[in-house]
Image (spheres, helix red, strand yellow):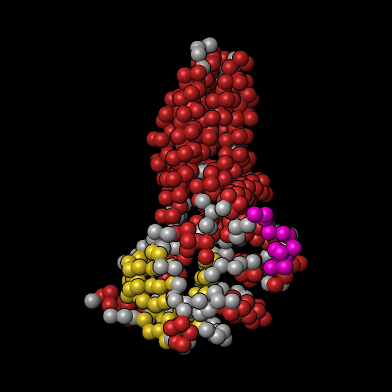
Amino acid sequence: MTDSQANTEVAIFASFNALLIRDLRVYFRSRGTWLNPLVFVLMVITLFTLGIGPDPTTLSNHASGIIWVVALLGIMLSLDALFRADFDDGSLEQLLLSPQPLYLAVLAKVLAHWFITGLPIVLASPLFSLMLGIPATAIPALALGLLVGSGILSFIGAIGASLTVSLRSGGLLIALLTLPLYVPVIIFGSQFVQSAIEGWPLMPTFSMLLGLLIGAMVLAPIAIIGGLRLSQDT
Amino acid sequence: MSTVASNHSSQASQQEVEPILVLDSVSCERGDRLLVENLSLSLSPGNGIRIEGPNGSGKTTLLRVLAGLSQQYRGTVLWRGNDIRQSRSALATDTLYIGHLAGVKALLSPLENLSWWASLHIPSTKPLSKATMLNALSQVSLEAFANTPCHQLSAGQQRRIALARLYLSEHRLWILDEPFTAIDAAGVVLLEQRIEEHLAKGNMAIITTHQAMQIDGFTSCSLNAAQSEEANSQ
């Protein structure tokens, strides 16, 4: 009995790994998907520095808000691709019909997507900080906040992506569906960076961000599965 | 009023064994058109059903209901005595569905495509060996293209990757929607042999096709679009 239980567990993790590796392979073979959000974020931040002007104090006053909003938009724009290709080529059908738990399958897909959108933005965040004149001492906190926050953005955004996947042009609808849900992330995310810049205690906002991430990780896949199942009925 | 005429060619064997799949007055509609009305049929081990009907008569809609992809139907579908609305995983473990969309990732090779599919649909303690998958690919004469990206292959070859799953599958029920589309004559003969083998092991198949098919153990069930449209307008 325990043996067969162990076997099922092995099979479940094998399918999680297989999906993760499959999606990462597909993303790396189509360079645009993982390069576009990063280049987008970089360009918009450059535009901000040009628009606001070169005064370092004005820039760094708005820096945390700018970085968070731009990262949010970058991730959101890439979300349409999350389930679209699977829907179009029929592999979403095969995924939904699998006897393996869908919860883990969705987790694998969102994780793979985060690896190519959220993670590059986190890794490039020191560069953004320099561009916007954030003090060097606040850079680790900014990266940490983005690391947790981009995960929340990916999970919440994936709900919007799953609900709009069967529509021919879901791009703008994703924005309308997910932007209201992004409000707490923006509030606590930019608050976190601001605290780091001002030297205020970091734990209160960080624990809020962490709580949001855990909540999104646990609850979002349920909504995503519902959205994906609905997509097959239209 | 029933719009379905089914001829049972193998009545003797049907009385001996319990049917595993039972449809009780199933009706499905697509948009506002009633496509299948009060369809009742049953399928027992070693038998197959061929769904016939002109284009737009609801063959695909019916197959998607039977596979558990679509929930938009009235009536009951029982798999091993359980309603498939309730026990989705029991049906998912036992069925293989190949629809119009191949479920093949264009950026991956045939081998990689088979590999992710197998880890989702063929639960086992260790991943299928490469030799097993290469063997399945050679059955559909794709062994020479095992590592070629699928977007470089023809439509027929991409279809064959999906059909290579039939050589890995031990599922009780195969649901195949137009499996012979884009397949050459020699390929069709091999596929028919494979389906025949499958039925001989006491498994089942539900197929739609417009081509002539020579396989024993198949009963046919025709969906008549003209009649159901008439009924709809009343």
For the point 55% across and 76% down, which residue is it?
A: B202
* Visible residue check, residue B98: no
* Visible residue check, residue A129: yes
Screen quadrant of the N terminus of chain B: bottom left
Q: Is residue A218 above or below residue A164?
A: above
* Number of marks present in the image shown: 0
Furthest residue in direction left, as rendered: B234
Query: What is the chief secondary structure element of the magenta stretch?
Result: helix
Furthest residue in direction right, as rendered: B144
For the point 57% across and 30% down, which residue is it?
A: A147
Residue A227 position within the rendered picture, expressed as x and y whole percent measured from the top left: 43, 50
For the point 66% across and 57% down, which residue is it?
A: B115
Whether residue B51 sits left or right of residue A90 in the image: it is left
Residue B207 position within the rendered picture, expressed as x and y whole percent measured from the top left: 51, 76
- The quarter holding residue A132 reads top right
Q: Is residue B75 above or below residue A226?
A: below
Q: Is residue A79 above or below residue A193?
A: below
Residue A108 position within the rendered picture, expressed as x and y whole percent measured from the top left: 57, 45
Q: Is residue B207 above or below residue B121?
A: below
Residue B84 position within the rendered picture, expressed as x and y whole percent measured from the top left: 41, 63
For the point 63% across and 57% down, which residue is it?
A: B124
Residue B10 in magenta stretch: no
Screen quadrant of the C terminus of chain B: bottom left
Whether residue B49 sits left or right of residue B72 in the image: it is right
Span colored in magenta: B125-137
Furthest residue in direction front, as rendered: A1
Q: Nearer the viewer, residue A120 or B26?
A: B26
